[in-house]
Amino acid sequence: MTIPPLILWVAALLTVLAAASPVSRERLDRFAAQTGFTVTAADAEQVVGHFRAVRRWRLIALVVAVPVAGLTNDPFSLVLGWCAVSVVFSRGASNAYDEARVYRGAWLLGLAGAVSATAFLLRDVTAARIAHTGILIAVAVAVTFAARREAASAPAELAIGRWSTRGLYLAGTAIVLSAALLTPGLPVLPEPPAYTPPLTFSDSRPSFETVRTYKAPSCAWTTQVAADCRGWLVNGQPFPQAAPYVVVPGKAPRPAPFTRSPDKRALVYLHRHDRRLVYEDEAGARPLTGALADTELPKVTFAGQNRYLALVRDGARIIDTRTWRTLELPDVRRVHDLGKSGIVAATAARALVLDHQGKPRMSLPAGDAYHLHPKGHRLVVIDDEGRVTTYDVKTGERLRTVTPVFRGDDSLGSGLGWSAKGAFQVRAAWSERVYNLDLSTGKLWR
């Protein structure tokens, strides 16, 4: 609960005034009634001196606690400043009389409740909560050790010990319960205006040479309010030309298509205003489609290289980003691999190896993962049982099937294609280590 700062400062002022008030006759009368000790002229100076010392140290503690409470808006500081003196400067305990057992029982119940509440509230970890928990533990230890100290045997000391016992347990209980239940309030914010006109995004088009980083919108869906978290970020800067979200009936809004090329030099995104898919690199932007409804957006992929782009939805469209030549593949439902040597795509029932004119070179039953050699003469197929099969693309002949054996309980996670040195590479499922795979023997090496 938020406490207005003015109320907290007034409470702090009243607390300081109470601590600064002199020791009154009424205080001595209450002391005598509580302890059953008759204060004589010989003992009066010792008893009054005890109360004066407590008041003095309490006032010093509050001088420190009040600014802390005001600056942090944390009322627990006032409780700690008032009660800590009774714990730290305890004169020893007298646990033999009946009232002491009552106070000790209240202390144990309060401590148990404070520990339970703290354990529950620590699920929301904050700096203030951690500080309160540390103070709770310190006070619990201090009260335990103070309660084991016996008061001196002189009559006045015994009476002060009984009074100190009461103060020790009550102050300790107040501190631990306050540490568990009181938290800093939030600052009081000014009232917002009745109406804030929506802000529009800038129409500027930030450019780039290399897309080092990009980040999707991270806060509530909207198309009006201008804030960095409500739009795409490219290299840490707002990228306002890209649409942040798409909305499909019956589903929650999700980030709009936004794909970076493997060489990090190009982006494909949905334009904010005209709702077309756009290809953009350092040379400028080029539309790839006409205006699209949010329910008509294709899947965009560069398929592991940079030159060719695939747009897949109820058919595939392959685009050469150098010549801007387009190839339509109406029956294709998924593009597995795409490079200079050809296209590996899947229809509803078959997997096809095609050239860039769309002519089939090879056909296989639909499987899981396909990798076409950069020269186009070999096709590697990985099935869901971890078998790796190599085919001759020209003849369609199956050349070899191997099952790579990994160390321990590890297994094949995915194929990565051919490295620059010509070795076929795979990634392990659990360790995520990358291995070279001999397609003839199944041998792995790093």
Image: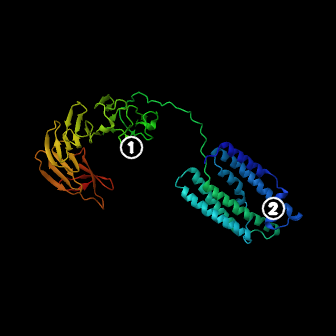
Q: Which residue is mark 2?
A: 30
For image coordinates 75% across by 68% down, the residue present is 151
Left or right, residue 371 beside residue 35: left
Q: Residue furthest bottom?
A: 96
Q: CA distance from mark 1 to mark 2?
A: 68 Å
Q: Residues within 10 Å of mark 2 (few under 14, many from 20)?
A: few
Q: Residue furthest right?
A: 41
Image spot of residue 24 (x, y percent): 83, 56
Q: Is residue 94 visible?
A: no
Image spot of residue 164 (x, y percent): 75, 63
Q: Is residue 130 above or below residue 359?
A: below
Q: How many marks?
A: 2
Left or right, residue 282 beside residue 7: left
Q: What amino acid is labelled 1 in the image?
A: Ala
Q: Which residue is mark 1?
A: 252
State the SS at label 1.
Answer: loop
Q: Residue furthest left?
A: 395
Task: Say which of marks 1 and 2 sits in front.
Answer: 1
Quarter-wise, where is residue 274 in the image? top left
Image spot of residue 227 (x, y percent): 46, 35
Q: Residues within 10 Å of mark 1 (few under 14, many from 20)?
A: few
Quarter-wise, where is residue 300 in the image? top left
